[in-house]
Image (cartoon, rainbow, N blue to C red):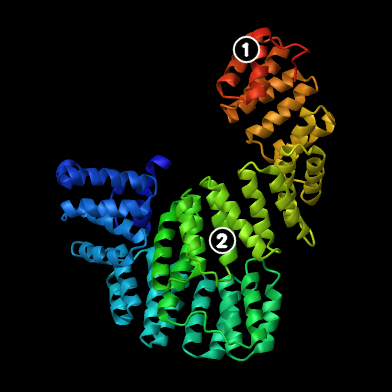
Amino acid sequence: MRNIRGLVVCVAIALSLGACAEVGNTTVGRTGVGEAQSFGDYLSARLAASDHNLADAARLYRASLDSAPDNPDLLDRAFLYTAAAGDIPQAASLAKRVLASEQENRAARLAIAVEQLKSGDYSGTRAQIAQSAKGPFTTLTLLMLDAWAAQGAGDTKAALADLKNVTTVGGTDLLANFHKALILDLAGRDSEADAAYHDAMGTGAASPRTAEAYGRFLERTGRVKDAQAFYTKMLSDVAIEPIAEEGLARLSSGKTPDRLIGTPEAGAAEALFGIAASLSDEASTDVATLYLRLALYLQPDLDLAKIVLADRFENLEKFADAVSVYESIDKSSPFWSAAAVQAALDETHLEHNDKAIAQLKDITQSDSNDLTAWTALGDAYRSAEQYPQAADAYDHAIKLLTPEESKDWAVFYARAMAEDQSKRWDAAEQDLQHALKLSPDQPQVLNFLGYSWVDKGRRLPEALAMLEKARALSPFDGYIVDSVGWAYYRLGRYQDAVKTLESAVLLVPGDATINDHLGDAYWRTGRKLDARFQWSHALAFGPDGSQKNEVEKKLQSGLNDANTH
């Protein structure tokens, strides 16, 4: 899919906003773009887009457009990529040019509406929305923005009427009720707002934004005991815990918070953020990115929008972009610590291990009880192949697990990997067994422990049972299939080993160890020519030093008891 990534932004936005036409089949020749420099900019823009480098794509499409200002395809692309890159004022300027020939263009109308809303031109915002073409998805967005623009103009009745129609165009009752509560809260209609907040929370767990809005509402309206009880209850929810802790700290200090949503602009940003956060599938990534950029233009300190935007970049493996977004979160934010930890982990993906370790050490030194930071520090040390230090960091994390829960298996598993690499197998074995005690159906833990026993020639029947269970849980994991095949081999079940290892090779082609194992199994079943073929493959796939020497010996003299595994 990477080779068509550059078209996804425009195609996805076209499907949702109706902005582009036949993007996938559009070509722009030298005569369409203009002079050679413009054509070079165009090709460079496509290359940047294919790697999802939005800022570069936007800049290069604009440069290409400068040489061919009447080219509608270039104008569309320059506008859309500029908006997706977050330069909303420039995008709105381009949108006005788009509207000169496409008066109902949804994306262009949306961008201009957001710009006018930012400036407080609520009637202008509503006029833009009214002139936009409608569609099942965009009607929801337009209703939400129109509701907040109407409230900005002092027409609460019209705002509530918009929200009443939200569920009929694909929105949810929770979304409509949440924004109804926010608008009634902003309008000072407290009793109605209270009822709407309760409706927005429904019968399940509250979302972080709903919880924060309602908690602040309780504080502001003088319901201190209710706020205390509400926040205390929310401490058990990991997603809401930072908000609850901040609320309880405010109550202790006697400070009164502002409304979560204090302006129509912030309300519209909240609406765009909420819609974007619901677009979690890969095909919607680019639409979500656009909406998040619009939301952050309206409310630059909307930290949850930044976190979701960074997450979208991580899904696209644009880790530098994700780090940049995380680093824009202020230290006063309750989400700063989590964002800083995630930014450091993204640095490890960029192979900036020293930087990541330094950042995480700073966090753990400032808060020695930050379980997430200690775990991330262990992960960063492992990425840097500093295994004893990784194990030490995991030690600190595990001491904070009080009480232990089933999800905590992952920390013990991670420490086991660090201990194994530190030549402390006994400690690693204990951690793996403890991880399975916490969560018995984790295929990776079953595979690690089972394969280690097989490779050491220990507890082979028990190891095979564990590995077969792991394979049943994760049947298409070639490494687990290889472990099962190797267990068969060590138990002398060579025909079973051949059949299973052949499957493993198909699932993970190009792995030296799996091809080496299959070669051994072939040799034991008398297929010596096939064995040498697999060993040759194993050698070509770059095994480490000790394995390389072993494979070379087998290619020279075959497999015998002296050089068997």
Q: Nearer the viewer, residue 461 or 450?
A: 450
Left or right of residue 11, residue 534 in this image: right
465 w.r.t. 300: above or below: above
Pointer 1 with pointer 2, Cβ within 8 A: no
Question: Earlier along the polypeptide chain: callout 1 or callout 2?
Answer: 2
User: Measuring 41% from the left and 58% from the top, which residue is drawn there?
Assistant: 287
Q: Residue at left 58%, top 90%? A: 221
Q: Which of 1 and 430 is in front in this view?
A: 430
Residue that mark 1 sits on: 532
Write down the residue under mark 2: 340
Amino acid beneath label 1: Arg
Picture residue at 57% right of the left edge, 57% below the top: 342
Residue 427 placement (x, y as % from top left) = 81, 43
Mark 1 or mark 2, which is nearer to you? 2
Q: Which of 220 and 398 is in front in this view?
A: 398
Q: In what element is the residue under mark 2?
A: helix
Q: What residue type is labelled 2?
A: Ala
Q: Image height check: is 175 above or below 76?
A: below
Rendering coords of residue 4 (x, y %) = 38, 43
Residue at figure coordinates x 32%, y 63% from the top left: 107
State the separation of the CA atoms marked 1 and 2: 51 Å
Quarter of the image for residue 334 reads: bottom right
